[in-house]
Image (spheres, rainbow, N blue to C red):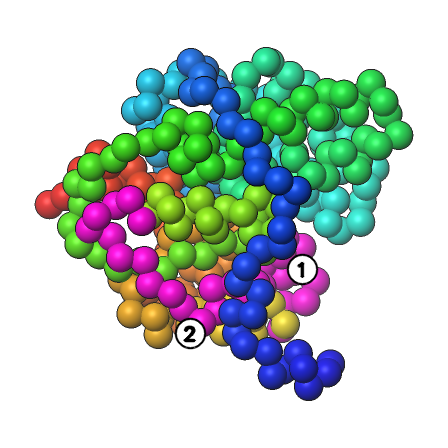
């Protein structure tokens, strides 16, 4: 690797690439579909329930189709396009209802909005359904901020948090910007920067399995940065990253922990975390 790579400032990639124009946002709908994601379903089910609670608090009825599974991202990023296409086709079948799809993960939302177009580029009829799904797909914090236009009273105790967003969520959905603004609206929450905020945590789906030594080094850098930030905890809207970071912290026997942003937000606005 070049010396330029090693000399780069830790947050040189903090700003996500420019996107083609601002996204128009609709009025708040009466109903939405929640795509829970496989990681939330298997490892962080309470975060999925908290996402539903946040939406219902805004007067939105939430549907959860039981036939949903994986968005297909692991197969797609591993180069298995045919397998990813079949998984994606199954999700299209359960998400075809004409209502917004809210996803508590920027990377999975980005899969719907960006990569399904590539998967079905040679199937014109399917591509029409894909285009419709892309326009109806919103990451959770994006939806709360720009569609529900939430106005919250912070019922929690004063705290300091560090934010982590996955690489693909930053590039494809700008979720770091949405999360920052939501956290900034909570008067008793101070968001602190850490010098590896924009760096990959090393998860990358199957990357962490294929290259465990590299992945392990990356997540150790991430955890050191988080613990040095002065934050009380880390929050993220990406379950895979959360699993990876907390797993590393556990292996290091460190008490510092992260949790899903949906659960953090629900605690702040519901007051359920108060003693």
Earlier sequence position, callout 1 versus callout 2 = 1
- Dot 1 crowding, Cα within 10 Å, few <14, some 14–19, many 20+: some
Q: Nearest to the eye among marks 1 and 2: give it.
A: 2
Write the residue at 31% across / 41% down.
Answer: 265
Instruction: Please check the rendered image and state whether residue 263 is part of the magenta-colored stretch, yes or no.
Output: no
- Dot 2 crowding, Cα within 10 Å, few <14, some 14–19, many 20+: some
Residue bounds of the magenta highlight = 184-213
Write the residue at 67% across / 22% down.
Answer: 132
Query: Residue 197 location in percent, x, y?
Result: 47, 64
Query: Residue 44 location in percent, x, y?
Result: 43, 42
Residue position for label 2 = 224
Mark drawn on residue 83: none
**61 versus 9 height, above or below:** above
Query: Residue 163 location in percent, x, y?
Result: 40, 56
The N terminus lies in quadrant: bottom right
Q: Magenta stretch: dominant SS?
A: loop
Q: Name the element at disc 1.
A: helix
Q: In this view, does 231 lie to the left or right of 5?
A: left
Instruction: Please check the rendered image and state whether residue 185 is part of the magenta-colored stretch, yes or no.
Output: yes
Cα distance between the residues tagged 1 and 2: 21 Å
**199 versus 112 height, above or below:** below
Residue position for label 1 = 207
Q: Name the element at disc 2.
A: helix
């Amino acid at each position: 690797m070049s010396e330029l790579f090693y000399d780069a400032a830790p947050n040189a990639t903090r700003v996500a690439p420019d996107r083609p124009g601002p996204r128009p946002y609709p009025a708040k709908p009466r109903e939405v579909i929640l795509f829970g994601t496989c990681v939330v379903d298997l490892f962080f089910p309470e975060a999925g329930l908290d996402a539903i609670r946040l939406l219902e608090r805004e007067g939105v009825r939430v549907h959860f189709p039981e036939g949903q599974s994986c968005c297909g991202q692991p197969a797609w990023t591993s180069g298995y396009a045919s397998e990813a296409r079949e998984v994606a086709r199954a999700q299209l079948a359960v998400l075809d209802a004409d209502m917004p799809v809210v996803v508590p993960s920027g990377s999975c939302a980005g899969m719907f909005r960006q990569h399904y177009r590539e998967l079905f580029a040679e199937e014109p009829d399917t591509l029409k359904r894909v285009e419709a799904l892309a326009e109806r797909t919103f990451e959770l914090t994006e939806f709360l901020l720009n569609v529900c236009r939430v106005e919250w009273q912070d019922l929690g105790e004063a705290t300091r948090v560090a934010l982590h967003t996955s690489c693909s969520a930053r590039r494809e959905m700008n979720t770091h910007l949405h999360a920052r603004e939501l956290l900034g609206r909570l008067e008793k929450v101070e968001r602190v920067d850490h010098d590896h905020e924009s760096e990959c945590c090393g998860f990358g789906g199957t990357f962490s399995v294929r290259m465990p030594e590299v992945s392990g080094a990356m997540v150790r850098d991430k955890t050191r940065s988080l613990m040095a930030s002065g934050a009380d905890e880390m929050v993220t809207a990406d379950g895979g990253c959360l699993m990876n970071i907390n797993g590393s912290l556990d292996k290091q026997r460190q008490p510092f922990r992260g949790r899903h942003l949906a659960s953090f937000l629900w605690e702040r606005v519901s007051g359920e975390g108060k003693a």
